[in-house]
Amino acid sequence: MGIYRYTIRRLLQAIPVLLGIITITFLLSDAIPGDPVQIMLGPSPSQAQIEAIRAKYGLNQPLYVRYGNYVWGLLHGDLGESLYYQVPVLLKIKQRLPATLLLLISSFAFAIVTAIPLGVISAKRRNKPTDHISRVIALVGVSTPSFWIGLMMILIFVYHLGWFESTGLVIPWEGPGPLIAPGNQAAALGAWTDHLVESARHLLLPTLSLGTLQMAAITRIERSSMLEVLSEDYVQLARAYGVSERTILRKHAFRNAQLPVITLIGLQITAAIGGAVLTETVFAINGMGTLIVNSIYRQDFPTIMGTTFFYGLVFVIGVIVTDISYAYVDPRVTYGEAE
Amino acid sequence: MSEPLLEVEDLRTQFFTEDGVVRAVDGISFTVNEGEIVGLVGESGAGKSVAASSIMRLVEQPGEIVGGEIRFKGETIFGLEDVERDGDGPPEKVPRDDMLSNAEVRERIRGREIAIIFQDPMESLNPVFTVGGQLREFIEINRDLPENEARDLAVHMLREVGIPEAEERYDDYPHQFSGGMRQRVLIAMALACEPSLIIADEPTTALDVTVEGQILDLVDDLQGKYDTSFIWVTHDMGVVAEICDRVNVMYLGEIVEQADVDSLFHDTQHPYTKALLNSIPRPDQSVGELNPIAGVMPEAINPPSGCRFHTRCPEAREVCTRTHPGCREVGDGDGPHRAACLKHEGVFNAGYVESESIENKTTGGFDVGLTEEGEADD
């Protein structure tokens, strides 16, 4: 029962889900009041202009034809053309994706790297001062809105201390731009260093702002999960056979305790996508979040549908990755075939 | 007679809960000699398992061993001494100098000298590691063997406890084993570390009867072969009869009767033991004739005054509500036979004979309903 076959099967199973997302967003955008053509043409367009635009975007055709065309386009990687930007939606997503991806990856990395040790230590020193401190941090973290954290950090670290930047992102892998003297390795190295420092200065606050909620949520589940596993018979048995507490924590308890954590991280991806919209707004980042919000303001239906489909795709992949890692951690979870 | 392997003296383990102090083990003393299987019997909540984990110093917060002594092969696993405090007040109990440290207990006693088999084989193996890997790890720790030798020994032990195709099953995960097979694995773990003493904490309770029989036979065989001593914790008098050499009957944290298995069964000296024996179902009895112990065991947080069993005892008299009997020698046979019951007037001299009998109104027990139903059927 190979992991490859399982992955392929899960991907095939994702097709109906994606088709559902496409259909629902398509029908919703048709049912929503408001006419994108009027928004495009301003207050008092002539009837001829309206007809021309409708014909250009195929809006004069019946619903099922438009639906068929849309799905057919999707199969060819065509998400339609943005009514506002007048460029293909896919191009727009390509432009905006790196910033959001960078933000999501860095905030999840921050969340996981801090939350797991915090949760484990908290469980190990249950009801001791370390545990209380970490629980207070987690409680504050889950109950504080991320945009408020963002605004407060901007106030302190940008306006008062001036340590970091509060607007936009610098994408690290895009490089420092053309060098004045090609071949000058010292200059190139310096430019790259400056570029990466700049990138970090822009990235840190949005990462903390978005990652705090994930960090807090993961810490809480990690703690309770570890506590549960530490009281299991097999941990007791390891103790009874003279295994040291350190080995018990790292080997005998840790892996079992990660199952609920993995589930939570998978689910948090959705929450983080939502959170990214707010974070991008607070930190003026031109990412997917601002793209989707602005498209809604402008009734730019192809872009709304395209970005929604894209987020759906990300989420479905997230769930599949969660399931696969689940089976990887726990041998009791098989890849869905009889033994 | 040679020095006993394990000596437990006046052991007290308490749990400090929000509702009060639970005296789970309240002053028990017993010994285990080499090559012996000693039973620790009693109902649920009698403190058997707490006593077992106390011996390995595995009692978890909020539980704590608060008194008594545990000696094993001349080493002190637990022991306190009085130290005079400055100024007034009672002397303070502190660990004795010769008591093993936590690290010493972990490295020298657990697994190496005393191993344990838990009640529920389904929960005792770690689901994310292979059975062989877990066995090998414990062997490596407690036998100081390199990995490949530990592996060979692990396979050998799996074969020894009757796992078919041990070589192949080595890499299987616990969920691929049945309950009985898992208990065999746990027995293999215990024996592989070659301890002098194995504590079996109700190891067959979670298994069905046919498997229970197989496991008991297996332990019987291997006990002779490896010459290991056992403490066999159980509530099942049938198992006791089958496997134990000597028996300690526990009630509410205390040992109420202590004897070798024959005189315990044929010359029972304590009403509680008698009640336990009477509550074993027999094929020639109907449910109505079955004679379970009246009522439920009181909580150890607030034990009854006097003899703790007097609330359920058919032979209780007024004096039993006032006087607490210790466990004393009562037997007239050859071996030692100790019991904690005032009815042995010659030993306790508490005025049992003149004392008035008391009616025990049982509450909450299931005997009443069952008996009435039984009578209605007649």
Image (spheres, coloured by chain):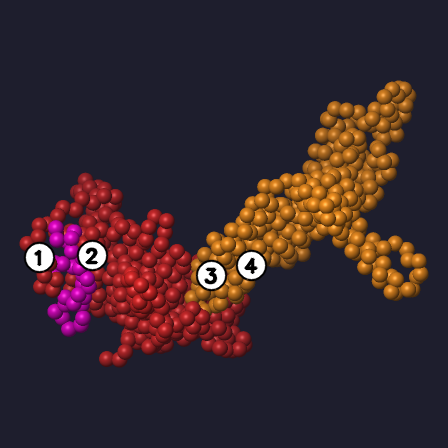
The stretch of residues the image draws in magenta is: B318-344
User: On residue B272, which mark appears?
Assistant: 2
Residue B247 relative to residue A72: left or right: left
Seen from the viewer's position, the closer of residues A276 and B293 is: A276
Which amino acid lies under the numbered mark 2 shown in the image of this protein? Tyr
Which amino acid lies under the numbered mark 4 shown in the image of this protein? Arg
Residue B232, horizontal then vertical, whole percent: 32, 65
Seen from the viewer's position, the closer of residues A202 and B10 is: A202
Quadrant (top left, top right, bottom left, bottom right) of the C terminus of chain B: top left
Label 3 vs label 1, nearer the camera: 1
Magenta stretch holds residue A91: no
C-alpha span from label 2 to label 3: 35 Å
> Considering only vertical position in the picture, is B262 above or below A90?
below
The lab-note entry on whether marks 2 and 3 share a chain reads no
**Residue that label 1 marks:** B351
Can residue A134 be seen here? The reply is yes
**Residue that label 3 marks:** A235
